[in-house]
Image (tube, grey):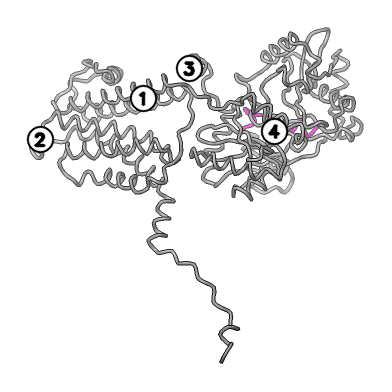
Amino acid sequence: MPGVTDAMPRPALEAPRESRGARWRAAYLRRAPGLIATISFVLGVASLVDAVWAAERRHVQMITGVPVPASAAATAVACVSGLLLIRLSAALRKRKRAAWRAAIVLAALITAARLVRDGDPGVAIAPVVLLVMLVTARTRFTAKGDPRSRWFALIVFVQFFVVGVVVGMSMLYAYPHRVVGHPSFWLRLKEVVTSFVGGGGYIDVRGERFDDVFHGTLLGIGLVTIVVVALLVFRPSEPIARLSADDEERLRTLLAKQGHRDSLSYFALRRDKSVVWSPSGKAAITYRVVLGVALASGDPIGDPEAWPGAIAAYRELVEEYGWTPAVMGCSELGATVFKREYGMSALALGDEAIVDVADFSLEGRPMRGVRQACTRVSRCGYDVTIRRGREIRPDEFGQLTKAAEAWRGDAVERGFSMALSRLGDPADTDCVIATAHRDGELQGMLHFVPWGSDGLSLDLMRRDRSADNGLNEFMIAKVIRHCPELGVQRVSLNFAVFRDAIERGERIGAGPILRAWRAVLIFFSRWWQIESLYRFNVKFRPYWEPRFISFPSTRDIPRIAVAAMEAEAFIVRPHRLKRMLGRL
């Protein structure tokens, strides 16, 4: 019928369906870095093991016609290449471009070495497969290299040295009939270590091929170790994280306008953090890279409307370098925005204790413990002075810093997400310092950073070990009572990790899983003060604000946990060696 065709709705144009091959290629490229990293690690281990067993292969020269020295050299090359592949596997998983280039060369070397040594194409299948995968997935390896300090050189040296010792000792103990006599363990170890630099001669071995493979492999490992470590030591040192003066000034401008939103916002001014800005400059995220994790702390700084821009810039930076994103101690709002903008999951990390100054009082039965402690300390003759940072002379700050270091029980200063880690800086004039004296002697101190214009956040709490118990409670109570004169309405105290688990796990009717989790936390409290900080905070009857950790996937949690513990100094590298390397 006329006009019917015009009246009928026209079918929408269907988008062209993606071919099965295209879908397969997309899935392959998505998984390629992980697969290649796994194959590289397995091939590297196999090359090291093969170097040990290849020493006993007989009839190689007869079958292949390859001279013994050439075959031994090929075995050593394959072994050293395998060692480097093991070291590169982690970087390949992070899509590092430099690691991809090195892996291409190493896979080719292992292929050539196996063909020269055995003359059988079948033994080169694995490195050829790796080489093909590296070439076909080259577009996935775009991440830049991480900035490294010279501390990294020591890590690489130890790893290569340990692997070399294991390979050398395995070769000596796997073929006892190749060793003349019965040399002791220490003599064998001496032979292995000196062979790294072309030495040896402490023990005698039988067989030309075994001797060539043994000493050639160890010499190759030694030379590679020396070259790699020398390159790492003498290259220009790059700071892992550094807050420039310009970035600090811009952050302070944001904090003056938006610092009241987050009690942890002032800690973004730590100078061992880096910062990434939103395109508008109205929001920023501070972070530090630890073990390949771009560890941010707290909520983004600035206007929440500009947070998506800062998160997008942070995401672009993370993908550019192949880092793992993570956020420590963000608020519920921050975790929600990171979930919406970045797809990051969130896990409750603990609760922050916040005291409302207007509601605080030492009266009543719930405050009896704090009240008794304050009364006892006051009768002992303690006096507390509360001042802004601008009111304290630099020489007095020097004395306070020395005292704080002397009172510190740990070997290092702990804190990253909730600590400023400096005292008396001329830029921190709005910080509040409470000092306790008895008979003119300094006995304790508290240091608070600003939380906007009407709040304080506890940064440092120290006291002389000989001071009376209850001094910290006495100082905090004095500060809270003095807050109206400072224009402060709220005070953030310590952060209680997994507070809910500790609190609920001790109640009647708690389930076995919750009780077991609480028992684990109590156990680790022997070293990390998990329970003691909760018990201390709860004395002041605060209200609790939950804090979260945001992460991309569950499989990343172990790495993020280790990185966070190192950033917070719960896991500490030897500080003396660190200082020595810092002088290089």
Q: Nearer the viewer, residue 142 or 477?
A: 142
**The quadrant where residue 355 appears:** top right
105 sits left or right of 6 in the view:
left
Residue at the image position 30 percent from the left and 18 percent from the top:
186
Q: Which mark is residue 228?
A: 1
**Sequence order check, earlier mark of 3 and 1:** 1
Q: Nearer the viewer, residue 201 or 481?
A: 481
Give the crowd class for mark 4: few <14, some 14-19, many >=20 residues within 10 Å. many
Give the crowd class for mark 3: few <14, some 14-19, many >=20 residues within 10 Å. some
348 sits left or right of 481 in the view:
left
Residue at the image position 37 percent from the left and 61 percent from the top:
21
Q: Residue 468's spot in the image, x, y percent?
A: 79, 16
Tell me the SS state at disc 4.
helix
Residue 527 part of the magenta-drawn span: yes
Whether label 2 touches label 3, CB < 8 Å: no
As measured in the structure, the alpha-carbon distance from the residue carrying label 3 to the one carrying label 4 is 36 Å
Q: Which quadrant: the N terminus?
A: bottom right
Q: Which residue is mark 4?
A: 531
Q: Which residue is mark 2?
A: 61
Residue at the image position 34 percent from the left and 49 percent from the top:
136
Q: Residue 275's spot in the image, x, y percent?
A: 61, 32
In this picture, which residue range is highlighted in magenta?
523-539
As measured in the structure, the alpha-carbon distance from the residue carrying label 1 to the one carrying label 4 is 45 Å
Residue type of the residue flagged with mark 1: Val
Q: Nearer the viewer, residue 307 or 474?
A: 307
As measured in the structure, the alpha-carbon distance from the residue carrying label 3 to the one carrying label 1 is 16 Å
Residue type of the residue flagged with mark 2: Gln
Q: Residue 543's spot in the image, x, y percent?
A: 80, 39
Q: Which mark is residue 581?
A: 3
Residue 38 visible here: yes
66 sits left or right of 563 in the view:
left
